[in-house]
Amino acid sequence: MSMKFDYFQYLVGQTILYCQTIEHDVKYIYAAMQTGDFAKNLRATRSWSLGTAVDNLRALDMRLGTAYLTDGDYDFLLSMTGKRNHICHGIYQSFIYVPNFESSAEYQRECDTLVSYHDAFLKLYRQVENVRIRAIRAFRGAD
């Protein structure tokens, strides 16, 4: 049986939430680990893309020897951009014009893709959230 479209839309929204939170948390972790004023550090990251934020955090994490995330984690964060872009800009395009799309192969393929991305991003969302909490405690002495 095919996924109901309402649930599909719910998962799209939830997946985008995870992506946005992960991106913000990566910048937040960087700002916490960077020396100087936290608020100023965070403002400096506002214009960064996810890729820039991940690259800068990776370099800082390795330089400080904290290794909050593994190379595999950083690689997945970098690959997230393409997946996020698919969810935000293209996931509907392969099926939305197909008559009775909920029973189409195109819709089922996107359902499978969405569930896979959703589950992977949920896991990463939780992991990055834990790193954010640990980094704030370690570098800023607060919760």
Image: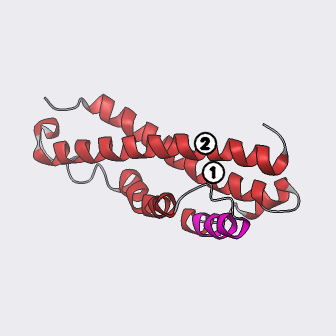
- Amino acid type, label 2: Glu
Magenta stretch in the rendered image? 53-64
Residue at the spot of label 1: 24
Considering only order in the chain, which callout, 2 or 1, is on the residue closer to the N terminus?
1
User: Which residue corresponds to the image point at 70% horizontal and 44% vertical from the top-left?
Assistant: 134
The quadrant the N terminus occupies is top left
User: Which residue corresponds to the image point at 16% horizontal and 32% vertical from the top-left?
Assistant: 2
Asked if disc 1 and disc 2 are in contact, CB closer than 8 Å, the reply is no
User: Which residue corresponds to the image point at 69% horizontal and 60% vertical from the top-left?
Assistant: 46
- Amino acid type, label 1: His
The number of numbered badges drawn on the structure is 2
In terms of image quadrants, where is residue 31? bottom right
**Along the line of sight, the residue nearer the viewer: 8 or 57:** 57
* Mark in the foreground, 1 or 2: 2
Is residue 62 shown in magenta?
A: yes
Q: Does 133 sit left or right of 75 as displayed? A: right
Q: Does 126 sit left or right of 37 as displayed? A: left
Residue at the spot of label 2: 129
Give the secondary structure at mark 2. helix
Q: Does 122 sit left or right of 23 as displayed? A: left
Is residue 34 shown in magenta?
A: no
**Along the line of sight, the residue nearer the viewer: 92 or 142:** 142
Q: Residue furthest right?
A: 37
